[in-house]
Amino acid sequence: MAAIGVHFGYTCACVAVYKDGRADVVANDAGDRVTPAVVAFREKERVVGIAAKQGRARNTANTIVKVKQVLGRSFEDPETQAHKAENKCEVVNKADRPFYRLQLEERSELVSPQEVAKLIFHKMKETAQSALGSDVTAAVITVPFEFAHDQKKALREAAEAAGFRVLRLIHEPAAALLAYDIGQDSHSSNRHVLVYKLGGSSLSVSALLVSGGMYRVLHTVTDHSVGGERFTQALAQHLAQEFNRSFRVDVSANMRSMLKLVHSADAAKHSLSSLGSANCFVDSLHDGMDFDCAVSRARFELLCASLFNQSIQPIRTLLEEAGLSCSDINQVVLCGGSARIPRLQQMIRDMFPEVELLSSSPPDEVIAVGAALQAALLVPRDRTEPGPEPDLDPVPVDVCAGDVLLKELDGFLVLLSAGTPLPARRHHVVRGPGSLSDLSLELFQRRGEGTERLAKLVLRDLPPAEDLHHIDAVVTMKRDGSLHVSCVEQGSGRSEAVTIAAAS
């Protein structure tokens, strides 16, 4: 039976299919193996992918990009506000959630981020079905390690609304390791693996400990201020300067002209990953004037030198915060389309001269491949295929995304630390004054610099105790990230329990 893995990134999406013993990324109807995560709304149709991206200059107000940035977030969230400021499509507040206001020919329409994400997932589903020639619903979806509960829930709901049966959400670093079969060939030695993911609008660097077939995320550093789009913008600004030098016309303040230059610069950037030079041609850039310019790889590297240095700095930050050195890293895995850039790869090689740099799989496809391999383990094998049923247990790649905390009188107690392999179970005895008739337990999860409350349990009408109330609290987190919390007061036997779906 076929299974698929979907990587839904901030700027692009990719789908891989597992069939006949191997996982492969499949091309969409335009022949591209990676689909831009761009959705354009028109009066009578909705366009997803490269056509929406290419038509953005003509339909700016109704073209939505980087929807993943606001999935599951409140309107006041700083990420939502940043998205609102940079997005040309109007973002408005509805019930403390962000919505896109579309200005169509005859009406105005509000669309939620989940609806936009559903259209992208549906495009991925259509792409997989075209490759397989049959319907397919079972899928594993990848998520960033730092995604909060609400973001994971929104992503899952969007995938299910598109017709997927989500087998599991797995973290992107774990999917990258699965794609290279890291940790699955030997259960004897411990290894430190660094996963470097540079996408279109964000950079994340993760250090993982591979031990006994299990992956444990030791530390992650994420930087949303750098990504492939910054490289594209730098090249587009250079092209605008060249046009000004040739025609004495400054188009840097003309949004439509700059969008055309950005599109041409993006195509040139991809070509420069494999060629020494690229040609940038824009038809009718300004007042009917065409623009043609050649850019060498050396020029591109010079324009982006400071950005490349900024892209490497998080590796040093990660190693320092994780208490590791370059010599402790055994392998480096490259992910994300911008990790194709030769200069960046060379800078990473210079930092880890004795370390194996894994880039044989296209970096923008490797996470989807890992997700498809994980899906193959979760889908029952076709009965006509020889061999035993797959054993699902030896690949426990899921880990707790953030510290799970119990609030006590004197502060927070860490019950499950970030990176704890799942499933996991913790027991703790909570004590409270015997004179109280009601006692509450609150569980939180650390999100960046702040905390998010997951659950509050209240034990009511407790009989007085001579000294202290003793409450047994048990916290269990399953591999899918769901959290089960139960508490029992030892003296009276009063109990409460709650389950939070996909809390990891």
Image (cartoon, helix red, strand yellow):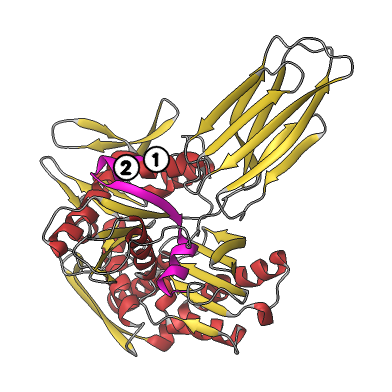
Count the numbered circles shown. 2
Which residue is nearer to you in this view: 489 or 9?
A: 489
Residue 78 numbered mark, or none: none
| Nearer the observer, 343 or 190 | 190
Q: Is residue 12 above or below residue 411?
A: below
Asked whether residue 104 is in view, the answer is: yes
User: Viewed as shown, does residue 136 lie left or right of 7?
Assistant: left
* Disc 2 packing (10 Å; few <14; some 14–19; many ≥20): many
**SS at mark 2?**
helix
Marks 2 and 1 in Cβ contact (< 8 Å):
yes
- Residue bearing the label numbered 1: 154
The magenta stretch spans residue 23:
no
Is 12 situated left or right of 501 in this image? left
Residue at the location (89% across, 14% down)? Answer: 466
User: Residue at point 70% right, 9% down?
Assistant: 461
Instruction: Indicate the position of residue 339 as horizontal and vertical percent values.
Output: 44, 74
Rendered position, 488 above or below 61: above
Figure quadrant of residue 280? bottom left
Q: Where does the magenta region start and end?
A: 157-181
Say what amino acid the circle numbered 1 marks. Ala
Q: Decide whether residue 158 is among the magenta residues.
A: yes
Residue 273, position as x, y percentages in the image:
36, 82
Q: Is residue 414 above or below residue 52?
A: above
The amino acid type of the residue labelled 2 equals Ala
Q: Which residue is mark 2?
A: 158
Image quarter for residue 28?
bottom left
Nearest the viewer among 105 and 329 is: 329
Cα separation, mark 2 vs mark 1, equals 6 Å
Residue 193, horizontal then vertical, whole percent: 57, 73
